[in-house]
Amino acid sequence: MRVAVAGSSGFIGTALVAGLRSAGHDVVRLVRHAPAAPNEAQWDPEQGRVPLARLVGVEAVVHLGGINVGSHRWTRRFKKRLHHSRIRSTTVLASALTGLAARPRVFVSASAMGYYGPDRGRELLDEESGPGDGFLAGLCQDWEHAAAPARAADIAVCHPRFGLVIGPGGGALKPLLPLFRLGLGGHFGNGEQFWSPVSLSDTVRALRFLIEQHGCVGPYNVSCPAPVSNGEFSRLLADELHRPRLLPVPGFALQIAIGQASSELLGSLRMVPTRLSEAGFRFEHPDARSVIKSAL
């Protein structure tokens, strides 16, 4: 199968391209710089330029682009950049696909668990759960809506709502590992908030599943089937590293350190991948311990 991937240089995108190639797929990487390899094609979402000639014969398109939400304090200016980087690129790519004589069968356009808001307590969140409130919830709703041109052109649109993706060398675990390796790690706030982790390898497998399985459409939670409290997650991480778990990090300290983004660490999202499981997808790392082991 011929697959185009935008956002292919990121943490998930790099692993996805490798996974698709290992499965025998032909991958076209949509990049913003001048092409440096035969499999690269330059696009410019700001200028609305998409290389349609390089997308001829593409059966699936995956869009993972967007500025990392944790790369900067959430100033008003940065939040505008977060919003623009996702909505503009998604709108441009979804619209461009409608101009192909033979349109792709599926457009996999990323979303995130932030769709459900910053804090839903112990509520079990599947794809039928309504959206939450707050900045990220609004961002994710706009992000998913931006793919509307593809939906209107009868392209199957899937929205993987990523949980906390954890893998070797990056993802949600990256900022935690140095402290935990030194034996200085602890849970955040009261530690009772639910986290919904997923291994990088299962994330890639889920994306491949959405690409390869005909009939997939709509939102899909991408997180392991067994979400855990932050306190339990920190205990498991310390245990796997054979290090002690020390005092918790107070909520006010996180707010001082990273500002509004602290709500994503202190809030509780108990997300489950109901639609993936019902479609026949099976996780290699179904719980927090196996997710942590896969990263370490």
Image (cartoon, rainbow, N blue to C red):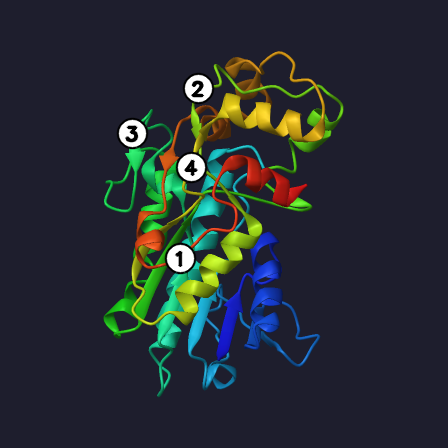
Rendered view: 222 above or below 93? above
Residue 272 visible from this viewpoint: yes
The mark found on residue 192 in the picture is: 2
Farthest residue in the right direction? 182
Q: Between residues 23 and 103, which one lies in front from this camera angle?
A: 23
The percent coordinates of residue 183 (x first, y second) are: 73, 20
Q: Quickly name the residue at label 3.
A: 123
The percent coordinates of residue 195 (x first, y second) are: 46, 32
Rendered view: 142 above or below 172? below
Name which of mark 1 and mark 4 comes first in the sequence: 4
Give the Cα separation between the discs numbered 3 and 1.
Answer: 23 Å
Name which of mark 3 and mark 2 comes first in the sequence: 3
Name which of mark 2 and mark 4 comes first in the sequence: 2
Q: Amino acid at mark 3?
A: Glu
Secondary structure beneath label 2: loop
The percent coordinates of residue 163 (x first, y second) are: 45, 43
Rendered view: 134 above or below 221? above
The mark found on residue 257 in the picture is: none
Q: Between residues 231 and 4, which one lies in front from this camera angle?
A: 231
